Amino acid sequence: MLDAKMAEAWRVLRIQSELVDGIERLIALSGAVTVFGGARFTESSPEYRQGVKLGELLAAEGISVITGGGPGLMEACNRGAFALPGTSIGLNIELPFEQTANPYQDISLNFRYFFVRKFMFVKHAVGFVGLPGGYGTLDELFEALTLVQTQKVRRFPIVLVDRNYWRGLYNWLVDTVLERDCIDAGDLDLFHIVETVEEAADLILQFMRPQE
């Protein structure tokens, strides 16, 4: 029993070290846009090209871009932001599959614990953008929505790109979740669905400009 307790104590220290390292490495950020998207999209896909364009649009304005650091649309956004005025940041996670750090990162952090990584996604965020993706993208989307809804973080733009991709989710929220009073009508205003990354970047920039 004592050995098991000691293992838990060491785990707390590992968690603490990830938090301290993440905070120190990103402490200079004045604001960043966190972008989520699927790891399985290839370089030849239109979604990948849109991801590159989004990274370019944000970084050209000096806005740092944070992704999960892996392949697919994470790589695309880091690639677009890489070597431009905004910093390209990857918050990588240890996984048994899919997650390999992409090479387009000015700052690359590695995490063992999802909840520490989630904290770092939010800490410096002035906007979230959701590109098409799977469970991980949905997890991060609803994490952000919950934090804003419960006022645990100040409200910032949460933008989903590709109306056709997100239409089914939106319809379910309206026809089932709202219909059963599990959310309020105003909760649907916590996010925007747009067609292009240009529209997403414009929404983020409109939010940031009054604060300059």
Image (cartoon, grey):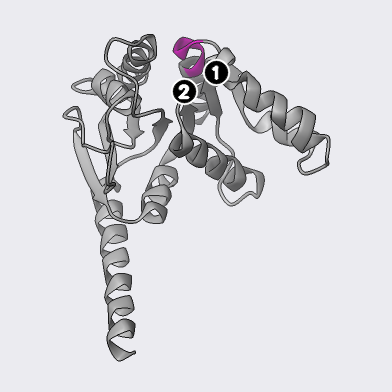
Of the two numbered discs 1 and 2 on the same chain, state the one appearing first in sequence. 2
Between residue 137 and residue 207, name the one nearer to us: 137
Image quadrant in which the N terminus is located = bottom left
Q: Position of residue 75 (x, y in %)?
A: 27, 26
Please count the marks in the image: 2
Say which element carries label 1: helix
Q: In the visual, does 136 lie left or right of 113?
A: right
> Looking at the rendering, which quadrant does residue 164 occupy?
top right
Q: Residue at x 31, y 25 (%)?
A: 72
Crowd tier of the residue under label 1, counting other residues whose Cα lies within 10 Å: few below 14, some 14–19, many 20 or above = some
Query: Where's residue 63, x and y in %?
Result: 35, 26
> Residue visible at 30% across and 48% down?
27
Asked whether the viewer can see residue 212, the reply is no
Q: Which residues are magenta?
A: 196-200
Task: Judge whether 125 appears above or below 75 on screen.
Answer: below
Q: Amino acid at mark 2?
A: Pro
Q: Residue 132: which disc?
A: 2
Q: Secondary structure at mark 2?
A: loop
Above or below for 7 versus 110: below
Query: Does the residue at mark 1 contact the one at mark 2 (Cβ under 8 Å)?
Result: yes
Q: How would you classify the magenta stretch by its main secondary structure?
A: helix
Q: Which residue is mark 1?
A: 165
